[in-house]
Image (cartoon, grey):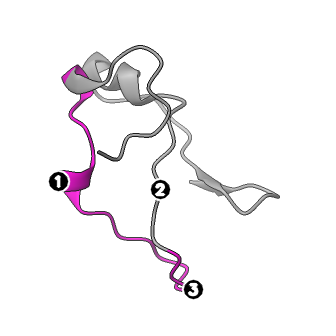
Amino acid sequence: MIKREDMRMGFIGEPVKRQYDAWLGKTLKRNDSKNPIAYFDERDILAPDEVETGTTFLNR
C-alpha cells in the first residue's frame, strides 16, 4: 500500500484472481475518521461480478 501526496491510499500488486480486475482503478469511500487505519464493511462493497462498466465508486 502506498500513500499519495493527496493523502489517498493505493495498493500495488497483482490481484490473485482475474475476477477482481473490475475493481482496478475504482474508488472506495470511507468514513471521515482521523484514525490512520480505515475499516470497511464488506457488505458495502460490490462483488466483482456486480461491477458494471463505468462504475466509479464501489460502495453501494
Question: Residue 7 lies in what quarter of the image?
Answer: bottom right
Residue 51 horizontal/vertical position (percent)? 31, 24
Residue picked out by circle 1: 43
**Looking at the image, residue 59 lies above or below residue 6:** above
Q: Among all residues in the image, which is located at the extreme left?
A: 43
Disc 3 or 1, which lies upstream in sequence?
Answer: 3
In the picture, measured across the screen, residue 15 lies left or right of residue 3, that is left
Numbered-mark total: 3
User: How crowded is the residue under tag 1: few (<14 C-alpha within 10 Å), some, or many (20+)?
Assistant: few
What element does badge 1 sit on? helix
What element does badge 3 sit on? loop
Residue sitting nearer the eye, 52 or 17: 52
Question: Residue 18 lies in what quarter of the image?
Answer: top left
Quick check: is 38 in the magenta stretch? yes
Residue sitting nearer the eye, 10 or 42: 42
Query: Which part of the image, by quadrant, shows the C terminus?
Result: top left
Q: Among all residues in the image, which is located at the extreme bottom?
A: 34
Question: Residue 14 lies in what quarter of the image?
Answer: top left
Q: Amino acid at mark 2?
A: Lys
In the picture, measured across the screen, residue 2 lies left or right of residue 32, that is right
In the picture, measured across the screen, residue 16 lies left or right of residue 10, that is left
Disc 2 or 1, which lies upstream in sequence?
Answer: 2
Q: How far is mark 2 from mark 1, CA to CA? A: 13 Å
Residue picked out by circle 3: 34
**Looking at the image, residue 39 lies above or below residue 47:** below
Q: Which residues are magenta?
A: 32-49
Residue 28 horizontal/vertical position (percent)? 45, 49
Q: Amino acid at mark 3?
A: Lys
**Looking at the image, residue 48 lies above or below residue 11:** above
**Looking at the image, residue 18 lies above or below residue 27:** above
Query: Which part of the image, by quadrant, shows the N terminus?
Result: bottom right
Residue picked out by circle 2: 29
